[in-house]
């Protein structure tokens, strides 16, 4: 989705940030992530669960491993030694069936849309929060002069947004106002208008900062105004 961003879109966002920061000593930083994680554990978990549950469910439904042997022309046996061999063969067939189910399920769940759909929402939320905090710290929003940096972060594949305000502005502004920033950004993303969402969120953030952090005569731009687009995982 990030490739939908045009140079004009990027310019609009940068201009919106620059305009918003004219009225405040606060700093606004915008980040867009196509996907914050590859969720490698999701295919493995679903494959393991499928390998445990599906063959067992087949047994409960009446399937027996020796049916596969008979299907491919195996001989039936009558004496004890042969029966022991048949049991071993059935167990081996069951293990092979589990392995096949594991591999097939892992390959299917590896397909990106399926993987994203089967990844628990709580895990996606946690990964997005962590990624947003990493960006907040790595770009130095926590060391701005007045501790009034605000990160606006969107994760496209996860359909999640994070707004992180440093303690200088977070203490001054009520929590509810940040929900409004999130709502503005989400509204644009839902329409497929990424730039519109960021521009609206930036304008709202600028108004919040202006109301609580007045501009200073010696103010300088401490962070880039442009949108940072992270590489896809």
Image (spheres, rainbow, N blue to C red):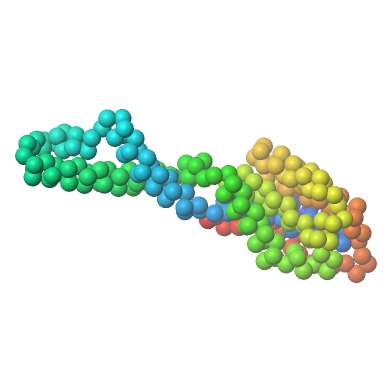
Residue 116: x %, y % from top left:
52, 44
| x, y percent for residue 48 | 39, 47
Residue 116 shown left or right of residue 178 in the figure = left
Q: In the depicted view, which residue is nearer to us: 80 or 196? A: 80
Task: Where is residue 189? Give x, y as percent.
Answer: 67, 42
Residue farthest toward the left in the current orientation of the protein: 79
Q: How many marks?
A: 0
Instruction: Please state if 95 lies on the left or on the right of 19 as rendered.
Output: left
Q: Quadrant of residue 60?
A: top left
Residue 204 sits above or below residue 215 on the image: above
The single residue placed furthest to the front in the displayed view is 80
Decide if residue 81 is in sight here: yes
Q: Quadrant of residue 227?
A: bottom right
Q: Residue at x 77, y 69 (%)?
A: 143
- The one nearer the camera, 8 or 101, is 101
The residue closer to the viewer here, 102 or 3, is 102
Of residues 186 and 219, the one nearer the viewer is 186
Q: Residue at x 30, y 47 (%)?
A: 99
In the drawing, does residue 35 fall left or right of residue 83?
Answer: right
Q: Is residue 229 left or right of residue 175?
A: left
């Amino acid at each position: 989705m990030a490739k939908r961003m045009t140079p004009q879109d990027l310019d609009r966002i940068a201009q919106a940030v620059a305009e918003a920061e004219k009225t405040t000593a606060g700093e606004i930083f915008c980040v867009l992530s196509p996907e914050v994680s590859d969720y490698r554990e999701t295919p493995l978990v679903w494959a393991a669960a499928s390998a445990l549950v599906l063959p067992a469910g087949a047994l409960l439904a009446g399937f027996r491993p020796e049916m596969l042997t008979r299907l491919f022309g195996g001989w039936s046996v009558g004496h004890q030694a042969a029966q022991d061999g048949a049991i071993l063969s059935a167990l081996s067939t069951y293990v092979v069936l589990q392995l096949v189910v594991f591999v097939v399920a892992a390959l299917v769940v590896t397909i990106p849309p399926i993987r994203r759909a089967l990844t628990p929402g709580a895990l996606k939320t946690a990964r997005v929060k962590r990624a947003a905090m990493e960006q907040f710290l790595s770009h130095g929003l926590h060391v701005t002069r007045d501790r009034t940096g605000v990160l606006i972060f969107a994760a496209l594949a996860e359909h999640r947004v994070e707004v992180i305000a440093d303690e200088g502005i977070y203490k001054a502004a009520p929590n509810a106002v940040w929900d409004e920033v999130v709502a503005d950004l989400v509204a644009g993303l839902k329409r497929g208008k990424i730039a519109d969402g960021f521009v609206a969120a930036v304008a709202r953030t600028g108004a919040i900062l202006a109301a609580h952090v007045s501009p200073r005569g010696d103010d300088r731009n401490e962070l880039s105004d442009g949108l940072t687009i992270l590489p896809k995982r």
